[in-house]
Image: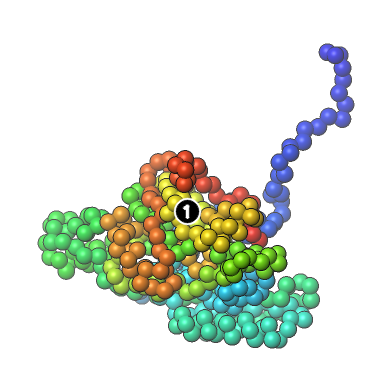
Amino acid sequence: MADAKISNFSLNCPVPRVADDRIVLAHGGGGRLTHQLIEKIFIPAFSNDMLEQRHDGAVLPLNGARLAFTTDSFVVRPLIFPGGNIGDLAVNGTVNDLAMCGARPLYLSAGFILEEGLEMETLRTVVNSMREAAAKANVKLVTGDTKVVDKGKGDGIFINTSGIGVIEEFPAPQVTREGLSESGVPHVSPQLRDVGTARKVQRDVGTTIGPASVQPGDVVIVSGDLGRHGIAILSVREGLEFESPILSDCANLWPAVEAMLNAGIEIHCLRDLTRGGLATTLNEIAADRGVSINLIEALIPVEETVQGACEILGLDPLYVANEGRFAAFVPAAEADRAIAVLKKVEVSQGAARVGTVAETPARTVVLQSRIGGNRVVDMLSGEQLPRIC
């Protein structure tokens, strides 16, 4: 046997390799491949200080004020789904990106790519939904563009919306004469004995809402139950029927954010839980800040119908997209008050504390299961539900 010769031998890997020389659907899923696309193609080409914020929008200084600017594209299939359609999704999605920057949404643009043969009634339905969503969010659509592509090349309607908002001054968290916030952070110098001066310092330190402000000791809050949007889309796309109808959670999140700001809550970071769900969002932040985020499964709100649908379909609700939910990072001393404020707002009545931020293990999200064990929650590697928004 030692002299035996093997011809035409080659090694084959049983795990399919993702092509890195062409785009696949998973590049748009918000997970690992999306981040590789951003890091390898877009960041090197366009890198600048504002893009490096890696937030839901860019915060731009202008004549002493601060504006937030964001853009988003929507290719959801089907165009109309339980609880909404591509029109109100496009408005709310961009409004929410501005809200996650702590900005009051003001103005939108809209670009439509229409497919030849699209029914006018469908277009009217989508446009009317956009009008109603914009009115509810108190934003104006001030400019736009329309293009038409050949039949079979556009899948009905694609929409791009961009938005501008303003970051306003809100009441600062209370500060004692000794210069310490009631929450204990940030520390203000004891030399600042004047309460008014201390309040101004507190406001200046605490106004940056974004991943860079997340720190160990923060509490992670979600604004409501998870997974409804993704399951609502899937139910129509695949012709599934559940005992109870599952509606998308598509909604404007600014009222919840505004309530926290008006209450003087010290907010470190806000992120809406869209593509890739809660798990991918938290992995982004953990990686960017070099921290550990520890979740408790029993505290994460998921409706029974959504949980049942996920179990049947082999999905994890932590990765399922939402369009009306966000995560907030606040100091531990502010958590109870933040939840109480959120519960008074319709869109965030289901707010709950779900985890905390720690120093180690760095760049990791860990879930404590219902039975007490721990597991690492990794970033979404493939495409769980393509074209969800």
Q: Secondary structure at mark 1?
A: helix
| Screen quadrant of the C terminus | bottom right
| Screen quadrant of the N terminus | top right
Q: Position of residue 62 (x, y in %)?
A: 39, 73
Label 1 Cα crowd, 10 Å radius (few <14 / some 14-19 / many 20+): many
Q: Quadrant of residue 15?
A: top right
The residue lying at 60 percent from left, 63 percent from top is 231
Q: Is residue 370 left or right of residue 258?
A: right
Q: From what the image shows, is residue 345 above or below residue 359?
A: below
Q: Which residue is more in the foreground, 320 or 109?
A: 320
Q: Is residue 159 left or right of residue 65?
A: right
Q: Position of residue 131 (x, y in %)?
A: 55, 85
Residue 132 visible in the picture? yes
Q: Position of residue 30 (x, y in %)?
A: 58, 58
Q: Position of residue 219 (x, y in %)?
A: 36, 54
Q: Which residue is more in the foreground, 145 or 74?
A: 74
At label 1, the amino acid type is: Leu
